[in-house]
Amino acid sequence: MADFRSSDPQSGPSALQPDPSTVSTRPSDPTRLNVLSLHSTKAPPAPAPVTASTNRWSLIRFLRRAIRTLVLITFAAALAIFLAIVGYRWIDPPTSTLMLGQRLLGIPITQSWRPLSAISPNLARAVIMSEDAGFCRHRGVDWRELEAAYERGQDGGSLGGGSTISMQVSKNLFLWPSRSYLRKAIEIPITLTAEALWPKARMLEVYLNIAEWGPGIFGAEAAARAYFNKPASALNEREAALLATALPTPLTRNPRTPSDLHRRLGANIENRMRASTSHIQCLPRATKAS
């Protein structure tokens, strides 16, 4: 605080002057300036106007991020599937997408994995003759059958058909069951990769162990015991043919009590099995035996 002193006692109060030695030289308190600035009547700057150009660039940035994320997810999924295919060459798949879907619905799953040597050769031959007679000749995709199935779809028919055993393995292990061109497009590269890494015997072994044969019934062993009360190794020709012809519609065809149509289809496959030698040349000798 300034000390006011008079140099002349006669000069009176008007002559009082502050003593320079007592005048504070400290800078003014910035908080006081801030308080004063709050009372300023100057308006804040207006925000930049949103223009069509701004919206367009925001949309472009969003699309770029979305595409980048989609590419990363696709790459990660493709890598995971590739590594699974490599591993499944020696390791038995613990489940399939179809089994997972039924588990989520609360359906109990019955499956017992069996090597190909523990499955009746009758069933191996019946399945090949019923589902994919060119199994030993093609490299995973039967392009002629696939083209025929595409043409049927274009003509308003079903999108089904054209799937080889190898393609069904790819679908059952990694994809969804509903039919669509998108699924087929994804199915083909997965199948070609699996065919390049697995021998034919391994492909058939995986198929016979993950195929659906009824509600919650997966694999040859579970099907043989559910319908004929015997192991898969003991199936005869008739039983194998009835099981094989149930594969296209496993939820409606019962091999234990076949309909007339189912019985006729089975008899047809039995006849074809007896002339199947040229169709099973890629299989081990034990599997070829009748």
Image: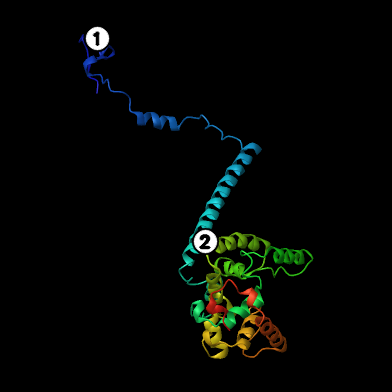
Task: Give, as a three-letter code, the residue at label 1.
Answer: Ser
Q: Which mark is residue 52?
A: none
> In the displayed structure, would residue 119 be above or below residue 164?
below
Residue 91 in view of the camera? yes
> Where, by quadrant of the figure, is residue 136 drawn?
bottom right
The kind of secondary structure element at disc 2 is helix
Q: Residues within 10 Å of mark 1 (few under 14, many from 20)?
A: few
Indicate left or right for 78 with 130 as reference: left
Residue 151 is situated, as x and y percent measured from the top left of the image, at 76, 64
Q: Residues within 10 Å of mark 2 (few under 14, many from 20)?
A: some
Check the picture and name the quadrant holding the C terminus.
bottom right
Residue 101 is situated, as x and y percent measured from the top left of the image, at 55, 72
Check the picture and name the quadrant holding the N terminus.
top left
> Where, by quadrant of the figure, is residue 133 drawn?
bottom right
Q: Which mark is residue 11?
A: 1
Residue 63 is situated, as x and y percent measured from the top left of the image, at 60, 46
Indicate left or right for 32 with 171 as reference: left
Residue 251 in view of the camera? no
The mark total stands at 2
The kind of secondary structure element at disc 1 is loop
Query: In terms of sequence position, does the residue under pointer 1 or pointer 2 come before the other?
Result: 1
Q: CA distance from mark 1 to mark 2?
A: 104 Å
Q: Cβ–Cβ below 8 Å for labels 1 and 2?
A: no
